Amino acid sequence: MNIQLPSPNGSRWFYALLLSITLAGFGAGLSSCASAQFSQTALDNSVSLGKDLPVLMNKATKAYSDNETEANALLAKVNDAYTLAASFKKNKDVAEQWRILRDDLVQPFLTRWKEKGKLDKDFIRPAAEQVKSALGAIERAEKAKPK
């Protein structure tokens, strides 16, 4: 499956996707928090990645090869966060948000960066905002769970 990130010219599609991810994340918080238990590690993952991923993405105006180690480490951290979320009972909605973040946002961005070598700021900015929004929704869902 080859997923393409939106081009700057496809802004309607981009904003529709952003809205759907945000709403899905909000919905995940509402539906999963009634039964899933709070995990400090899961919350820490969303907060940490919410800071680190946008910083890395903004480095995409420079060569991927200069940032490959950091990119691989953060992708591994996203994958670990998904695995953790999926391991909790009654946490299907939040785990799905992590999967979407990994498979539909982060991985395609990094793949494109690696293929192109460098990316344009007009491409990076909306992609980074989309990642921030998705992680914000995951963070809100984690905070809404009973402790």
Image (cartoon, rainbow, N blue to C red):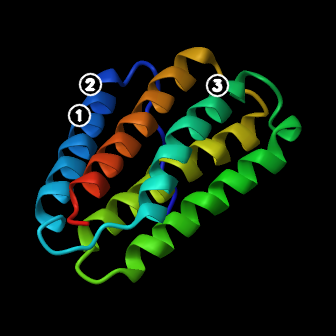
Q: Which mark is residue 85?
A: none
Looking at the rendered structure, the kind of residue marked 2 is Arg
Task: Give how far across and how far down residue 61 sits, in percent.
Answer: 72, 21
Q: Is residue 17 left or right of residue 66?
A: left
Looking at the rendered structure, the kind of residue marked 1 is Ala
Front position in the image: 89 or 145:
145
In the picture shown, does residue 62 fall above or below 6?
A: above
Q: Which residue is mark 2?
A: 12
- Residues under numbered marks 2 and 3 in contact, where contact means CB atoms less than 8 Å apart: no
Task: Give how far across and how far down residue 103 sits, in percent.
Answer: 48, 58
The residue lying furthest to the right in this view is 66
Q: In which quadrant will I find the C terminus?
A: bottom left
Nearer the observer: mark 2 or 3; the answer is 3
Q: How many marks?
A: 3
Task: Give how far across and how far down residue 49 sits, in percent.
Answer: 54, 46
Q: Is residue 10 left or right of residue 124?
A: left
Front position in the image: 106 or 31:
31
In the picture shown, does residue 41 fall above or below 73?
A: below
Task: Give how far across and how far down residue 65 sits, in percent.
Answer: 87, 40
- Residues under numbered marks 1 and 2 in contact, where contact means CB atoms less than 8 Å apart: yes
Q: Which residue is mark 1?
A: 16
Q: Which residue is mark 3?
A: 58
Looking at the rendered structure, the kind of residue marked 3 is Asn
Q: Which structural element holds mark 3?
A: helix
Write down the quadrant of residue 87 in the picture.
Answer: bottom left
Crowding at dot 1, Cα within 10 Å, few <14 / some 14-19 / many 20+, comes out as few
Front position in the image: 82 or 146:
146
Q: Which structural element holds mark 2?
A: helix
Work out how far the residue at label 2 is from the one at label 3, CA to CA, in angstroms: 22 Å
Front position in the image: 52 or 108:
52
Nearer the observer: mark 1 or 3; the answer is 3
